[in-house]
Amino acid sequence: MNRQPLVTIGVISYNNARFVVEALDSIKNQTYQNIQIIISDDCSTDDSVLVIEKWMQENSHLNMIFFTTSVNGGVCKSLNKIVQHSQGKYIATISTDDKYLPNFVLNRVEYLERADEQTGICYSKSNLIDEQSVFIEEESRDVWLTGNVFENLCKMSNSFCKPLTMMVKKEVYSTVGIYDENLIFEDLDFLFRVSKIYKIDFIENIDTEYRIVTNSLGTKLLTTPRGLESYAAVIKKNIGHSTMGDFYLAKRLRKISLKKKEIGLSSWYPDFKLSVKYSKSVRDTLIMCLFYPKHILTNKG
């Protein structure tokens, strides 16, 4: 076992007392054994902490660290705490409502150990399960990006994988930095930053289970002011890397700016204007000139 690279698995816990044992058992039952488990509970208001502490007592032989907070700080703070305390060569993270299948770690370590040094992350598709852990279907997307993916990622309407399927070389965090705690869409921002420098490889193994939970926050984020502002911030952070990437990011920013306008956010116009700058859209330039002349006079640049 000591010849196996150490893998850190970070567990993000928040109000999932009914699922957390399944998630933790899925880590304990990995066929790969050299694992460090770091659990971070972000001020759960249910019995999550008690359930986790009981599980840890029953599995005290495992290499574990448990952090709790007295104030809810958000996912990014938990992720960064895990990265900062990780000792593994590789890092994977999972929410307490999801699960790994037994060969998750083994499959990824074997892949990354063979991959070239430019590969920073590998990921796969996932099985979708319901709240009773019953299989729903295999995850489906129009495309599974692999290799140098930055410009293709710019074209997409969102991210291209579920974070629980990823394994990341720890050196990647030293290169691109940790998660931006000012954002909600921290995984998308992280993938943008990584894909500018490293390859992100898709592998065929389906060895995770992503739980579909009714009324989850993620399904509503792009209807809220905070969600729209955060999504726009991710796009604006990553404009300026390549001409083609800028064109597609500008198109995404345009859509977000118009959603902002619909719900009355004053920041919509600066974002719309920035999208025109990078997309060089004649249509949108005319829209600005014809319908928003006051904005043009008072928002120079």
Image (spheres, rainbow, N blue to C red):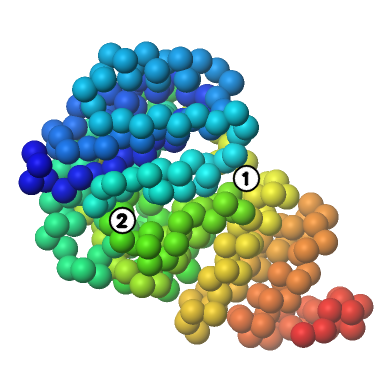
Quarter the N terminus occupies: top left
Q: What residue lies at 38% left-to-right and 44% top-to-bottom?
A: 85
What SS does tag 1 mark? helix
Instruction: Report, in whole angstroms, how far the alpha carbon at label 2 lies from the one at label 1.
Output: 29 Å
- Point out residue 33 in the picture as x, y percentages from the top left corner: 15, 35
Rendered position, 99 above or below 265? above
Tag 1: amino acid: Leu
Quarter location, residue 113: bottom left
Rendered position, 157 above or below 163? below
Relative to 113, 93 lies left or right: right
Quarter location, residue 230: bottom right
Residue matched to label 2: 170
- Point out residue 112 in the picture as x, y percentages from the top left corner: 18, 57
- Point out residue 42 in the picture as x, y percentages from the top left corner: 53, 32
Q: Nearer the viewer, residue 10 or 133?
A: 10
Relative to 45, 276 lies left or right: right
- Point out residue 160 in the picture as x, y percentages from the top left corner: 40, 56
Relative to 127, 113 lies left or right: left
Tag 2: amino acid: Lys
- Callout 1 environment at 10 Å: few (<14), some (14 to 19), or many (20+)? some
- Callout 2 environment at 10 Å: few (<14), some (14 to 19), or many (20+)? many
Rendered position, 173 above or below 166? below
Q: What residue lies at 60% left-to-right and 73% top-to-bottom?
A: 250
Q: What residue lies at 77% left-to-right and 85% top-to-bottom?
A: 301
Is residue 219 among the parts visible in the rendering? no
**Numbered badge on residue 221:** 1
Q: Which of 215 and 48 is in front in this view?
A: 48
Q: Which of marks 2 and 1 is in front?
A: 2
Is residue 185 among the parts visible in the rendering? yes
What SS does tag 2 mark? helix
